Image (spheres, helix red, strand yellow):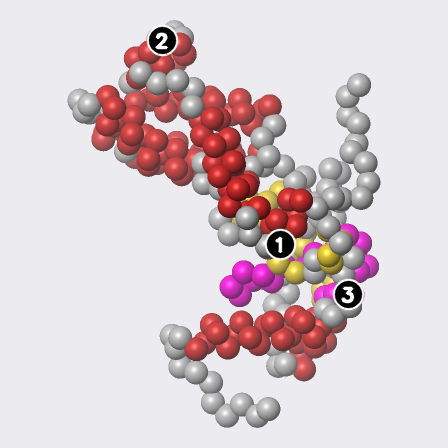
Amino acid sequence: MQTGRGVRQGCCLSPVLFDLYSKCLAKEALDGLGDFNFGGQIIQTVKYAADLVLMAKEERVLQGMFDKLIEIGRCYGIEMNVEKTKVMRISRQPSPVAIMIDQKQLENMECFKYLGSMLTNDGRCTCEITSRIAMAKAALSKKKTLITRKLNLNLRNKLVICYIWSMALYDAETWTLRATDQIYLESFEMWCWRRMEKISGTDHVRNEEVLLRVNEQRNILHEIRKWKANWIWHILRRNCLLKQVIEGKIKGEMEVTRR
């Protein structure tokens, strides 16, 4: 098909045409490739808008997927930008991956921000949690004049939960919490109440006393569990990839770390 003229910048047809174009390209290039089997289904890609993620268990399989995608992409008139293409191995013991494009090796990433969430090569959520807590603390420091005024106590509590907790707990329903992560979150919760009441660390005020002053209990972990329950129910009532991932089984055995 000969293309005589493209669409204008900002045209509503532009994202639709690009989506159709990229779907046809990926389907033709990756047909029959891939070894990431989850729940009996081969998962080759994860797509969002103009982003494309290739998934594979073996390095040679991933290299073959890249080679085929580049070959078919050139037939479609599309070139892959090596500088914007990254690779990351997610494992308990991550190691570099040597993926080549036009004799250039792709950069290996230890952490990568995708759709607002921080992904790390160890598969844990600690980096994401600490990053979110840092963002929330910075936001609270900017709004401290608002929440430390002589406002009603219940109103100030609601301001902290609405504006600060919502930033810290973004995407929290998908987190896998370890014991250390729970400690970080509970420490952040107490930090918010202490900052709201202008209680310094040198004042030697116990957490129980702080909770009595603000008329609150330790709720942050309970809120996350409640969000998880609502999210799971929303996913399981649909027939989608996320449901297959949650209900699917991975071949192999869990590593025994303690006896």
Q: Say which residue label 1 marks.
A: 241
The residue positioned 79% from the left and 32% from the top of the image is: 255
Q: Is residue 132 visible?
A: no
The answer for how far apart the CA atoms under marks 3 and 2 are is 60 Å
Magenta span has 34? no
Q: Amino acid at mark 3?
A: Leu
Magenta span has 61? yes
Locate the N terminus and report the quarter of the image it occupies: bottom right
For marks 1 and 2 on the same chain, the one whose residue lies earlier in the sequence: 2
Residue 21's place in the image compared with 89, above or below, is below
Q: Could you tell whether 139 is left or right of 243 in the image?
A: left
Residue density around tag 2, few if under 14, some if 14–19, many if 20 or more, within 10 Å: few
The answer for how far apart the CA atoms under marks 1 and 2 are is 47 Å
For marks 1 and 3 on the same chain, the one whose residue lies earlier in the sequence: 3
Q: Position of residue 66 (x, y in %)?
A: 72, 66
Q: Which one is in front, 244 or 162? A: 244
Which picture quadrant has residue 144?
top left
Q: Secondary structure at mark 2?
A: helix
Question: Which of label 1 and label 3 is nearer to you?
Answer: 1
Instruction: Point out the residue furthest to the left here.
Output: 150
Q: Give, as a single range, the part of the protein colored magenta.
A: 47-67
Q: Position of residue 172 (x, y in %)?
A: 50, 37
The answer for how far apart the CA atoms under marks 1 and 3 are is 19 Å
The reply to whether dot 3 and dot 2 touch (C-beta < 8 Å) is no
Q: Amino acid at mark 1?
A: Leu
The residue positioned 70% from the left and 75% from the top of the image is: 28
Q: Amino acid at mark 2?
A: Glu
Q: Position of residue 44 (x, y in %)?
A: 70, 60
Q: Say which residue label 2 marks.
A: 209
Q: Secondary structure at mark 3?
A: loop
